[in-house]
Amino acid sequence: MDEIPVQEKREVPQKQEGTVPARSFIPSADIFETDDALEVVLEMPGVEQDHVEINIEDDVLDIRGTIDFARYQGLRPIYTEYPIGHYRRSFSLSNRIDQHKITAELSDGVLTVTLPKAEQAKPRKIVLG
Amino acid sequence: MVTNADHLHALMTLQRALERSFDSDWLRGSTAGTGSFPPINIFQQGEDFVAIAELPGVSKTDIEIQVQDKAIRISGRKTVQPKGPASIHRRERISGVFDRTIALPVQVDADRLKAEYQNGMLALFIPRAESDKPRTIKVG
């Protein structure tokens, strides 16, 4: 197995000047397709169960994870290698997805969003005659 | 009552403090440096230290921590395979093995060192050895 290289966190670009100057970051994502669904897997270390917000509007899947900074109270940074902040990422959904059946699961800082395919979008095998 | 403004203030204060210690030479005298996985932030809590590493999706049983003298070694493996057969549309997460040693500039009380893994974050509570703490000398 290969040794893991360090990935630097990518910051969410501010399209216009924000009223909120705190920085947010783009979580790394894997997207898998199975026969029944699309799975979007995002790494959001430090995000707890009730700190995830998933919204679907106008065919856009918007995912946010927030960090509880109270945990850092009393801690004074003396050596830093990575920044800390909330996470945010959006994806456009195709009409192949049944938006009403989207589910999500968070485990060890990894959020898996399952996007079930609409019935007619499921793959049909073509049998060679 | 904690308001949204308080949360925002806490976030910004922490982010600014982290930025200031990005160029910290706290580990300069040792062999450690950036570029190894997992990335680690070190905080001071009173007289002791807390090291926090980001290890999302790593199983607790896949993490090994060793302490010796002033060095802490964190090793393990990170896997990112989907549960069943699947076709990949996008691949950004990285998997593999890691084995990183941090040589601290202070003596550590290894017996009282505690490790906690929660929400993909590994926190090491590193108590400073008694012999390392500054002692005040009374002038007689």
Image: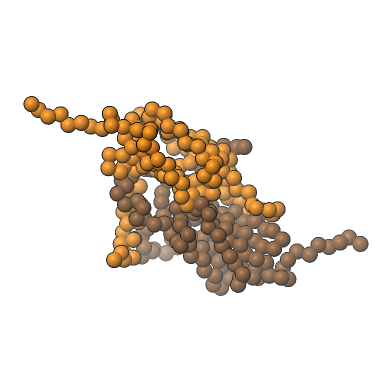
Chain colours: A brown, B orange
Residue B24, compared with residue B119, is above or below; it is above
Residue that lies at the very extreme toward the front in this rendered image: B111
Residue that lies at the very extreme toward the left in this rendered image: B140
Q: Residue drawn at (51%, 51%), measured in percent from left and top?
A: A108
Quadrant of image for the N terminus of chain A: top right
Residue B106 drawn at (x, y percent): 33, 31
Residue A90 shows in the view: yes
Q: How many marks?
A: 0
- The residue nearer to you, when weighing B108 against B18, is B108
Residue B21 shows in the view: no
Q: Residue drawn at (58%, 65%), measured in percent from left and top?
A: A103
Residue A111 drawn at (x, y percent): 54, 57
Q: Residue drawn at (60%, 37%), measured in percent from left and top?
A: A2
- The residue nearer to you, when weighing A127 against B19, is A127
Left or right, A113 with reference to A12: right
Q: Quadrant of residue B43?
A: top left
Residue B93 drawn at (x, y percent): 57, 49
Quadrant of image for the C terminus of chain A: bottom right
Residue that lies at the very extreme toward the top in this rendered image: B140
Residue A124, compared with residue B138, is above or below; it is below
Q: Residue drawn at (73%, 66%), measured in percent from left and top?
A: A122
Residue A32, compared with residue A81, is above or below; it is below
